Image: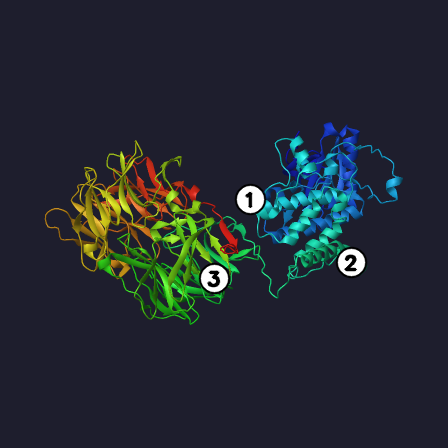
């Protein structure tokens, strides 16, 4: 039975259980004499009466006591009390390899380090005459100081390796604890001779270590099956799948070293753990990939013997070639293999691929050595993560909070990115961050060898240029509103550093596409019909996405023309229609990085939450920017992007049947229901208004024409909230040339329809919501730089109250006005604040977090409350983008010819 905390075994006070196994239970304990934490392993009383088990237990004590090695758990003491036999060992702090493998495979560099330490530990045991016999992930601890090999409970004296002399004289031996023919160990990690119950030597441990190394690299067991019989059969008869099938970038030398561990015949394996340890240590050195000889190939006299088979084979091939008339030339074509691998984000983080102003595409450096990608960290902020592809570790670049859409300098030494309304740059060492230019909503950039950066400063801008050292941007291209053109974005310099390709977006689908222009001649020239960014890559191809398939097509940067047919590649790439963003990047030397198609935001869902956080999913098959529940709660007005569309439209979705009906055709967002549920007011764009957002309305029944309610030359207007009596509409106003400075206005819909200002630019208001009685307005206040929720009286804009204290987005009132809900970014929760009105003053309660949602979910304002205040509609079932890995392809172009 378990031992209760506080129990004393001599001077050792039990603190808590650590684990259990076939040979006993392990507890954390305190050594009261030396005031240190130890691990106490106990053989239960009902097993102590078994002479064989007790003998094995005593043998473990003697075994470990003779093994003094930094990678073997230290034995401090042995004892017996009231029928309990126990060992007192070093308490190893860390996690077991089995626990680490639950998170996925390990990088090859880390595998080599751990493997070398384990091989070193086994060498010590084997030289001491001990075979462990139970090498498995659960018996390996990963600590800050290194690897620790645990649990010698099944260890036994080693049988000397057979030699030509001993084979003729050796006689069968009986062992009082484990007789020949008895299987002891853990099935999946046993050697073939262990399965067969044969006598074991150190080479059995080497096989078991090979199975562990295989699992560390691939995340799957070398030998597996549905039963012990099928596992045993696999170990005896089958070879595990090649490691490179799962982890393509695994060094071939490491693959071979593990293969040699897993040889069925012990004579074909590494003959000592020392040989293996030396090999692994050599593999971890920077010169390992270029050296041709092994450092442990002990004596020169053995080298000829070692390579004799290869020399003979080479001579035979030369002779055959000569007979067949083959004549060598001075050049040799070497096939480059296409290798595929995946990268996981830093621990407790995830890649940020589908944000609007943050996140974006993983950017491969021009030399193919690095990839930089935005990641969501645990504090909810997005930062840039830099990873050298030949390294097992990455690093967060300091000063990159709120970053997105990074791109590289041509020498691969610096990174430019958009953050907090600026275009910035930093070096790969992350030593400093410099401001380059203003860019309130950057949409891509490119950097040439002359030190010029071209970029798109926001979502409705043309391409501009600026020195990489910083300065005032100068226009390069010009928008053509007459053609319905709304944006130039995602530029990329061609090799001459003058011409560049970019995406031109237009209200007209036959105009939108990939274009080419020059800093000297900005007249755009059509290249390819697509709504997503495309890349020019050496050796002369345009890479682009169609649906989620990646294609390559020949492109001549001199004539600026495509040729040949598009060549489909096997990679399925994620997309983000709202930004016309295909989530991939490529270097100049054949390295491709991308988020897979399951990262596409169009697969995300709406989620219903109740006040306790219980949820149910409502599929939308769109990327949404806003949702509004009808006054009777039966219908939802959605603003969103259908797959492969970059223009959002308003849709009506029936909650009972789940059907959707489009209500608008042009760019339209921010739906607001009229009180009678018959009309939807929204933000829309029409060519006649020079593509500047205005206030429109449409029949909620569908089939009606869109009507312009209000527009203002030179200003973009966004519908914010409709008063409960249907007589007044709030809207956010900003100059079309600078949408970062906003103010909140009210538009009377009856009588004198002249709008008036409610909240001035100094508070930079964004989303706003009328209280049900229209006496108060809750809004996002950005006067301090952060978004906070405030309330002011309407119509005078006075008596301002601060609602949130640590950030707040998207205020929504309960139907009776007695609660206000908002998203709290500090803890990713939907929070509620009680509201009471007394003598024209408000009394506010403390924000009360109701439930947590994914940090991305409410960022675009897709969050509404049912009329009864008991259900919440939130965008973002995280299954489509949470934990998505980054895919790396080396030599993607190897087979294009």
**Farthest bottom residue in view:** 450
Helix, strand, or loop for circle 3? loop
Q: Position of residue 139 (x, y in %)?
A: 67, 42
Helix, strand, or loop for circle 1? loop
Question: Is residue 79 among the parts visible in the rendering?
Answer: yes
Residue 461 higher or lower than 145, as above or below: below
Mark 3 or mark 2: which comes first in sequence? 2
Mark 1 or mark 2: which comes first in sequence? 1
Callout 3: 10 Å neighbours few (<14), some, many (20+)? few
Per the image, the residue denoted by label 2 is 304
As measured in the structure, the alpha-carbon distance from the residue carrying label 3 to the one carrying label 2 is 43 Å
Helix, strand, or loop for circle 2? helix
Dots 3 and 2: beta carbons under 8 Å? no
Q: Position of residue 588 (x, y in %)?
A: 48, 62
Q: Nearer the viewer, residue 263 or 393?
A: 263
Q: Nearer the viewer, residue 403 or 810?
A: 403
Per the image, the residue denoted by label 3 is 539
What residue sits 17% from the left and 44% below the top? 705
Callout 1: 10 Å neighbours few (<14), some, many (20+)? few
As measured in the structure, the alpha-carbon distance from the residue carrying label 1 to the one carrying label 3 is 38 Å
Per the image, the residue denoted by label 1 is 103
Q: Is residue 247 left or right of residue 66?
A: left
Q: Quadrant of the N terminus?
A: top right
């Amino acid at each position: 039975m378990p031992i209760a905390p506080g129990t004393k075994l001599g001077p050792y006070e039990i603190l808590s259980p650590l684990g259990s196994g076939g040979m006993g239970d392990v507890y954390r304990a305190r050594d009261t004499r030396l005031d240190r934490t130890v691990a106490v392993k106990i053989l239960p009383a009902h097993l102590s009466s078994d002479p064989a088990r007790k003998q094995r237990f005593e043998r473990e004590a003697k075994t470990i006591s003779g093994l003094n090695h930094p990678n073997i758990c230290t034995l401090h003491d042995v004892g017996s009390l009231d029928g309990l036999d126990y060992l007192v060992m070093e308490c190893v702090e860390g996690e077991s390899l089995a626990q680490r493998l639950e998170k996925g495979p390990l990088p090859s560099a880390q595998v080599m380090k751990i493997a070398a330490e384990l091989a070193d530990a086994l060498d010590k045991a084997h030289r001491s005459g001990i075979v462990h016999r139970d090498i498995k992930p659960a018996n390996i601890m990963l600590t800050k100081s290194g690897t620790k090999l645990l649990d010698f409970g099944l260890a036994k004296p080693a049988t000397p390796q057979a030699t030509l002399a001993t084979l003729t004289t050796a006689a069968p031996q009986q062992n009082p604890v484990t007789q020949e023919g008895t299987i002891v160990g853990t099935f999946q990690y046993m050697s073939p001779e262990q399965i067969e119950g044969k006598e074991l030597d150190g080479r059995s441990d080497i096989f078991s270590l090979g199975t562990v190394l295989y699992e560390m690299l691939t995340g799957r067991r070398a030998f597996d099956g549905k039963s012990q019989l099928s596992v045993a059969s696999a170990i005896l008869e089958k070879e595990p799948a090649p490691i490179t099938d799962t982890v393509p970038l695994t060094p071939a030398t490491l693959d071979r070293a593990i293969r040699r561990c897993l040889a069925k015949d012990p004579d074909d394996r590494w003959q000592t753990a020392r040989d293996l340890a030396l090999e692994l240590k050599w593999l971890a050195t920077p010169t390992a990939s270029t050296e041709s000889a092994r450092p442990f190939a002990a004596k020169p006299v053995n080298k000829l013997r070692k390579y004799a088979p290869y020399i003979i084979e080479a001579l035979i091939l030369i002779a055959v070639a000569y007979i067949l008339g083959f004549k060598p030339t001075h050049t040799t074509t070497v096939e480059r293999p296409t290798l595929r691998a995946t990268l996981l984000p830093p621990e407790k983080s995830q890649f940020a691929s589908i944000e609007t102003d943050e996140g974006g595409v993983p950017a491969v450096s021009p030399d193919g050595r690095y990839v930089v990608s935005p990641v969501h960290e645990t504090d909810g902020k997005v930062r840039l993560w830099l990873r050298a592809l030949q390294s097992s570790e990455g690093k967060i670049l300091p000063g990159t909070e709120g970053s997105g859409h990074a791109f590289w300098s041509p020498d691969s030494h610096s990174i430019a990115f958009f953050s907090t309304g600026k275009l910035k740059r930093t070096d790969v060492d992350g030593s400093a961050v410099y401001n380059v230019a203003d860019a309130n909503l950057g949409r891509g950039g490119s950097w040439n060898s002359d030190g010029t950066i071209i970029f798109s400063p926001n979502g409705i801008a043309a391409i501009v240029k600026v020195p990489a050292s910083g300065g005032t941007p100068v226009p390069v291209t010009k928008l053509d509103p007459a053609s319905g053109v709304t944006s130039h974005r995602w530029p990329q310099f061609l090799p001459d550093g003058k011409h560049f390709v970019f995406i031109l977006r237009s209200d007209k689908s036959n105009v939108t596409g990939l274009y080419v222009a020059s800093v000297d001649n900005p007249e755009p020239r059509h290249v390819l019909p697509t709504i997503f960014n495309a890349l020019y890559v050496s050796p002369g191809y345009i890479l682009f996405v169609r649906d989620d398939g990646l294609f390559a097509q020949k492109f001549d940067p001199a004539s600026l023309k495509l040729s040949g047919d598009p060549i489909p590649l096997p990679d399925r790439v994620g997309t983000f229609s709202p930004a016309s963003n295909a989530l991939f990047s490529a270097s100049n030397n054949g390295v491709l990085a991308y988020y897979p198609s399951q990262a596409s935001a169009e697969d995300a869902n709406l989620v219903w939450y109740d006040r306790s956080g219980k949820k149910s999913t409502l599929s939308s098959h769109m990327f949404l920017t806003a949702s509004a529940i009808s006054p009777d709660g039966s219908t939802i007005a959605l603003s969103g992007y259908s797959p492969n569309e970059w223009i959002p439209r308003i849709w009506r979705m029936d909650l009972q049947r789940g059907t959707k009906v489009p209500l608008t055709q042009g760019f339209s967002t921010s739906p607001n229901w009229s009180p009678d549920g018959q009309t939807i007011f929204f933000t829309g764009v029409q060519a006649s208004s020079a593509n500047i957002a205005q206030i429109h309305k449409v029949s909620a029944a569908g089939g009606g024409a869109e009507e312009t309610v209000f527009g203002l030359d030179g200003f973009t207007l966004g519908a914010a909230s409709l008063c409960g009596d249907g007589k007044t509409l709030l809207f956010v106003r900003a100059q079309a040339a600078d949408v970062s400075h906003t103010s909140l206005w009210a538009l009377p819909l009856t009588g004198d329809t002249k709008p008036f200002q409610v909240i001035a630019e100094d508070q930079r208001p964004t989303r706003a919501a009328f209280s049900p009685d229209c006496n108060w307005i809750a809004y996002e206040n950005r006067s301090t730089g952060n978004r906070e929720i405030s309330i002011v009286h309407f119509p005078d804009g006075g008596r301002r109250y601060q609602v949130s204290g640590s950030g707040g987005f998207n205020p929504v009132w309960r139907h009776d006005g007695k609660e206000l809900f908002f998203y709290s970014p500090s803890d990713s929760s939907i929070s509620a604040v009680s509201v009471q009105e007394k003598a024209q003053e408000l009394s506010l309660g403390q924000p009360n977090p109701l439930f947590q949602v994914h940090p991305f979910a409410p960022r675009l304002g897709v969050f509404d409350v049912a009329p009864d205040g008991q259900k919440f509609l939130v965008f973002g079932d995280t299954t489509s983008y949470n934990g998505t890995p980054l895919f790396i392809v080396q030599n993607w172009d190897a087979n294009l010819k």
